[in-house]
Amino acid sequence: MKHGLKIFSLVLTTLLLFACNNEEKVAEKLIRPVKYQEIGYLGGEKIRSFSGTAETDKIINLSFRNTGMITQFDIKLGQKVKRGQLLAKLDNVQSRLAYEQAITQLNSAESQMNTAKLSLNRTRSLFEKGSASLSDFESAKNAYKTAQESFQSAKRGVGIQQDQINYGYIYAPEDGVIASVNSEIDETVSPGQAVATLNAGSDMEITLGIPESVINGVKENMNVDVDFASLPGKEFKASVTEVSPAVDANSATYPVRVRVTNPSEEIKSGMAANVTFDFGKRNGTNTTLVIPANAVGEDSNGRFVFLIETDGDHLKVKKHGVDIGNLTSEGFEVKSGLSAGQKIATAGLQTLLDGQEVKLQ
């Protein structure tokens, strides 16, 4: 019996080792994605595409201006709403209590004002008859004036507390569609806390980042083409509406916004878009090659780029020396070492290795 158990254990161990070896063999090989650009001529025809994200031109975060628990919440994802429609409200317990206290203060102030007015009238009558002094009359007038001011202050206090109650309601500020919902009924919220997002704009815009090498070619009202991976075979026209004069520190690109001129209901906020710019053929006779500044590295042997070359069914990067010239608005002029149409990596040069397998991004 013991001998049989030993044989069984030996067989089981062998199978486990064999399975582990197979797992190691079928482990998926990680391939480094790289951004790239084809080498072209200085001032030559340039058609460049950049990725962006679609969003409506007016996005409103819906929030209360008061603190409390949500007692009504008629907001659903994708819901179409009309301007002025009640969407949510709070219990407003504290605000209602403060409002009742303000009403009590107003009634008290009104009573004191009426009493002061009666006292003023009586003192005036006595003063006219010579039975009251001028100082008594002036004192009565001042008391009435003070009572009037207290009444007006209490009246304003009631209005303020009424506003606090109104701050516990959310009405749709514009016609639109609910794009996101962040809260639920019976949840306690704070002032300014976004409970939902409303896409209220009628126009669809694309936000994207443009690299330094071509930003000077992007102008307001410039026409561009837009397509979406989720809408194959469909192309849209758009126009540049905003060009940032400063680089975004997070992406190291210049934020640009374009507006779709022939929008469709199929375009949803958040869709990934591909925006194509045609920078035009500015000088067809120029034969000077140019490469982006961020594609050039330097080591002890001099300046280099990483060429992207085909190796059978794979792509690999090759460290390649290059002789560069002046720096232009489009990048470095190339004196020797490269030719038009070659692909070069434009990002991550510090981490790329000579001969490393890559895929285009």
Image (cartoon, rainbow, N blue to C red):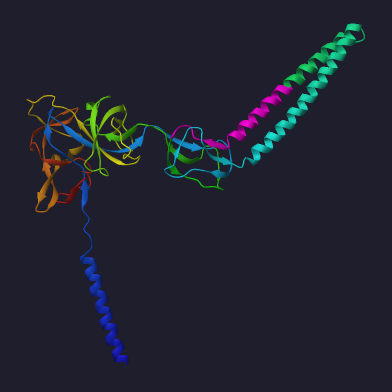
Q: Is residue 87 left or right of residue 117?
A: left
Name the residue rendered at 58%, 41% in the picture.
90
Residue at the extreme bottom of the image, as rendered: 1
Q: Is residue 176 left or right of residue 351?
A: right
Indicate the quadrant where residue 273 lies: top left
Residue closer to the observer: 258 or 177: 177
Q: Could you say where residue 48 lies in the image, as x and y percent from the top left?
A: 19, 34
Q: Is residue 129 left or right of residue 4?
A: right
Name the residue rendered at 34%, 41% in the picture.
270
Q: Is residue 254 above or below residue 306?
A: above
Indicate the quadrant where residue 53 lies: top left
* Residue 300 visible in the picture: no
Name the residue rendered at 29%, 90% in the picture.
4
Name the residue rendered at 82%, 11% in the picture.
138
Q: Quadrant of the N terminus?
A: bottom left
State the predominant SS element of the stretch in magenta: helix
Q: Could you say where residue 240 lies in the image, as x and y percent from the top left?
A: 28, 28
Q: Is residue 191 above or below residue 143?
A: below
Q: Is residue 66 left or right of residue 26?
A: right
Picture mark count: 0
* Residue 358 visible in the picture: yes
Q: Could you say where residue 164 lies in the image, as x and y percent from the top left?
A: 61, 33
Indicate the quadrant where residue 289 lies: top left
Q: Could you say where residue 106 lies in the image, as x and y percent from the top left?
A: 73, 28
Residue closer to the observer: 75 or 226: 75
Q: Is residue 163 above or below residue 355?
A: above
Q: Quadrant of the C terminus?
A: top left
The residue range painted magenta reads 150-175
Q: Is residue 169 magenta?
A: yes
Q: Is residue 321 magenta?
A: no
Residue at the extreme right of the image, as rendered: 131
